Image (cartoon, coloured by chain):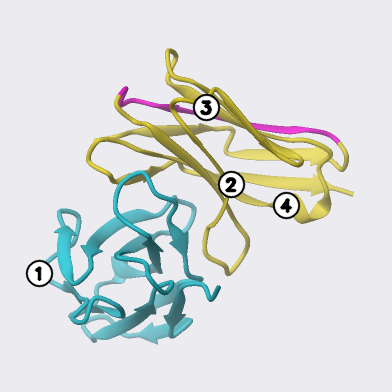
Amino acid sequence: GENVEQHPSTLSVQEGDSAVIKCTYSDSASNYFPWYKQELGKGPQLIIDIRSNVGEKKDQRIAVTLNKTAKHFSLHITETQPEDSAVYFCAAISNDYKLSFGAGTTVTVRA
Amino acid sequence: EAGVAQSPRYKIIEKRQSVAFWCNPISGHATLYWYQQILGQGPKLLIQFQNNGVVDDSQLPKDRFSAERLKGVDSTLKIQPAKLEDSAVYLCASSLQAGEQPQHFGDGTRLSIL
């Protein structure tokens, strides 16, 4: 099955700075890569996703890049705000249509 | 559009007792998933339904866990008997169809086993 690794496990940034989270995956057949934000006591919320036929996708302050050759993808948050503080998960869907999650990154935005 | 609804939000039971969780997916979503999320980890798939049929239950501990989606809409997940290691958040998610589709999650049921 798919194995997704995520780094770093924790990330502390000053408000207004950028945050970058990186993930690698093992199955070259994976074609769909969603990112989720999970706040305390809530379920994971889909914030952005990317498919393998696209190298980059942007939605306001959030962007995701995908390098299929290297099998890695990244989440970029610009101009971070206190409400960006949460746990972020990367994930990948491979040929068996199972969603495999990374271990999560706890992002703290310091005011 | 209403999101995925789950109940109860919290449950505390003693080991060896039984417990059931309920999920109502987003209207029109054919695929429903149950995940287990242990503290500090990402969600792990337990079972996947397509309409009222099971697509994948390879990670479901079938000696104690069971799930059903009788009319292809709501679903229940049951644990009997519960073990200490079952303490986790149980998340329900749904998508329009199976495959490379966005999955939308409910807020989960936090289960504590004493």
Q: Quadrant of the N terminus of chain A?
A: top left
Proximity of marks 4 and 3: CB atoms separated by less than 8 Å = no
* Figure check: A24 above or below B82: above
The label nearer to you, 1 versus 3, is 3
Mark 2: give few (<14), some (14-19) or many (20+) Cα within 10 Å: many
Disc on res. A85: 4
Q: Which amino acid, mark 4?
A: Ser
Q: Is residue A20 magenta?
A: yes
Give the mark, 2 or 3, whose residue is nearer the N terminus.
Answer: 3
- Asked if A2 appears above or below A24 in the picture, the reply is below
Q: Chain of mark 1?
A: B
Q: Badge 3: few (under 14), some or many (20 or more) residues near its Cα, within 10 Å? A: many
* Marks 1, 2 in one chain: no
Q: Give the distance between the C-alpha atoms of the residues marked 4 and 1, in whole angstroms.
A: 39 Å
Q: Nearer the viewer, mark 2 or mark 3?
A: 3
Instruction: Determine the residue positioned at 46% across, 78% down.
Output: B5
**Which chain letter matches label 3?**
A
At label 4, counting other C-alpha atoms closer than 10 Å, the crowd grade (few under 14, some 14-19, many 20 or more) is many
Residue B63 bears which disc, if any? Answer: 1
Give the labeled residue for mark 2. A88
- Type of the residue with mark 2: Tyr
Residue drawn at (30%, 47%) of the image: B99
In the picture of the structure, the residue carrying the numbered disc 3 is A73
CA distance for labels 2 and 4: 9 Å
Query: Helix or strand or loop: what does disc 3 sit on?
Result: strand
Is residue B114 visible in this depiction of the protein? Answer: no
Where does residue A13 sit, x and y in percent of width and height? 79, 38
- Please state the horizontal and vertical placement of residue A101, each as a whole percent of the image: 41, 44
* Quarter location, residue B54: bottom left
Please name the amino acid that badge 1 sits on: Asp
Q: Which residues are magenta?
A: A17-28
